Image: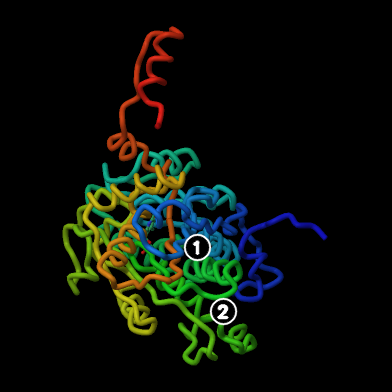
Amino acid sequence: MSTHYTGLIERYRDRLPVSKDTPVISLGEGNTPLIELRNLPRLIKKEVRILVKYEGLNPTGSFKDRGMTMAVTKAVEAGSKAIICASTGNTSAAAAAYGARAGITSFVLIPEGKIALGKLSQAMMHGSVVIQIKGNFDDGMRLVQEVARDMPVTIVNSINPFRLQGQKTAAFEIVEELGEAPDYHALPVGNAGNITAHWIGYSEYICKDTQACALCKGKCGFHKEPRGAKRPIMLGYQAAGSAPFMRGAMVDHPETVATAIRIGHPMSWNQAWKVKEESGGWFGECTDQEILHVQKLLAQSEGVFCEPASATSLAGVLKDLERGAIGEGSTIVCTLTGHGLKDPDTAIAQSTRPITVDASRGAIEKVIGENMAG
Ligand SMILES: *Cc1c(COP(=O)(O)O)cnc(C)c1O
């Protein structure tokens, strides 16, 4: 039997809205590592099991690929020749790559000057038509919806329901690896599509009535009567300057170093409140300083490099462990939504400068002597 992995649509075909004739557009997304943190729990002196789902190892470096393989597959199946999205960066990178793979045109709207360098390079390199707007993500999202009403372009933002269908597979992978759902699942929240998708995934996975699942294809939302099996408590963390779920209202001028979640008018507003309610979870917020601190802590204590927005899930969990909201003995999964290489500027700005010396053995030995541990 071949073990060649060909992406999440093939792997979870029976749980996704595709038929045998659907032309699958895949770059081998999904199947990302679930890494148990070894050093950090010791550093914070807590008896907990924290695992990070490293979605930065998807083909374009973020979880957006899970949704994009489905959205572009269904767009192509429907005969669409062009896709469009508004993006804080990662959606545009994924749309650009999957659009190229499908041989269709992609249009991406990004906020001028507020997108991380790696993401911009991806959209440009894959040949998207990159449109920088003098506005923020929320302006872009509004414009995309207006334009798509009259022009033959398919929206591939998370308001496209196929996006969440693809993204729900991350929850399937976690349950399969752990044997059951974790006690808590933490995610950074921007549009709140991903936290919604995970809840759909956890809910569908425990629904024993697979026939019903196959019929509704998740359209019924969250299966109402899970049969006894476990689902996690869902935790959604926001950046303090961009935290509509904490304010209980839309935020008009969101600001944060975590540009991927610099969103003041979340598209999945109602769904995310429902997730909180149904799972018994909560929302929390972290300052930019806390986010960057944890991004660096994770990189230096565990060797895992994620982008600033992604560190928000772990930063929130560490705060809630500290204040006792999450008890010791818990198993917690934190989604690391995107790779650290996406945003090299922010990484370099908060790191120690390289040491410059003469090209001599003496100079190198001096540096080693000064920096040896113990
Ligand atoms: C898109 C994105 C998010 C936010 O996900 P939502 O579904 O919009 O809540 C978080 N982190 C990264 C890196 C992202 O690209």
CA–CA distance in space, label 2 to label 1: 18 Å
Element at label 1: helix
Element at label 2: helix
Q: Residue at x 41, y 27 (%)?
A: 372
In this view, the residue in front, 274 or 321, is 321
Q: Residues within 10 Å of mark 2 (few under 14, many from 20)?
A: many
Which tag, 2 or 1, sits closer to the chain's start?
Answer: 1
Image-quadrant location for residue 357: top left
Residue 119 located left or right of residue 67? left
The residue indicated by pointer 1 is 67
Residue 217 located left or right of residue 120? right
Q: Amino acid at mark 2?
A: Tyr
Task: Give the x, y percent position of residue 276.
Answer: 34, 78
Figure quadrant, ligand 1: bottom left
Q: Residue at x 34, y 21 (%)?
A: 355
User: Taking 51 as reference, is 347 above or below it?
Assistant: above
User: Taking 312 as reference, is 325 above or below it?
Assistant: below
The residue indicated by pointer 2 is 205
User: Taking 16 as reference, is 56 above or below it?
Assistant: above
In this view, the residue in front, 131 or 343, is 343
Q: Residues within 10 Å of mark 1 (few under 14, many from 20)?
A: many
User: Taking 209 as reference, is 163 above or below it?
Assistant: above
